[in-house]
Image: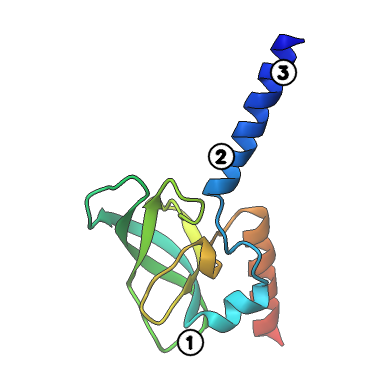
Amino acid sequence: MGLNMHILTFVILMVISFHSLACSCVYYKEEDFSSRADQIALVKILKTELLEAPNPVYSKVKVSFEIIEMFKHPNIPYEYAYTFSGTNGCSVHTFPGQEYIMYLSEDQWFGKCNGTEIAYSYRGEELLKKFRSNEAD
């Protein structure tokens, strides 16, 4: 009985911990992400650069990328953007060579809270299908 109580307490504490680190914006709808974004593009990450020393929650990161496909505002050719990297649930952990569907704000910030997604995840592939079918219309 005592061991089961310890396991139950551990599981409850883990759930609470993960929930406290979760991104508070994940409840936005796709339409919100699209309408709020200044630019939406499929990009390939070329380089990441830590701009501020790490703190317990996050670090500012400059991400250079190559645009593969543009889905919104094709006349604005951003070549880099900023994100946060850290332990919070809203971080997008970017790595050179990976592809993302990047939703950029006007001030060139991106993250999970504005819709950015790994391109070849389930959600990413669904977004690519949607954006490409809209272009064909």
- In which quadrant of the rendered image does the C terminus lie? bottom right
Cβ–Cβ under 8 Å for marks 2 and 3: no
Q: Quadrant of residue 12?
A: top right
Nearer to me, 103 or 86: 86
Which of the two labelled residues, at mark 2 and mark 3, occupies the earlier sequence position?
3
Of badges 2 and 3, nearer the viewer stands 3
Residue 132 in sight here: no
> Would you name the residue on which mark 2 appears?
17
Compute the Cα span from label 2 to label 3.
18 Å
- In which quadrant of the rendered image does the N terminus lie? top right
Query: Which structural element holds mark 3?
Result: helix
> Would you name the residue on which mark 3 appears?
5
Q: Is residue 122 left or right of residue 50?
A: right
Q: Amino acid at mark 1?
A: His
Q: Amino acid at mark 2?
A: Ser
Q: Which mark is residue 73?
A: 1
Nearer to me, 121 or 83: 83
Residue 99, compared with residue 79, is above or below; it is above
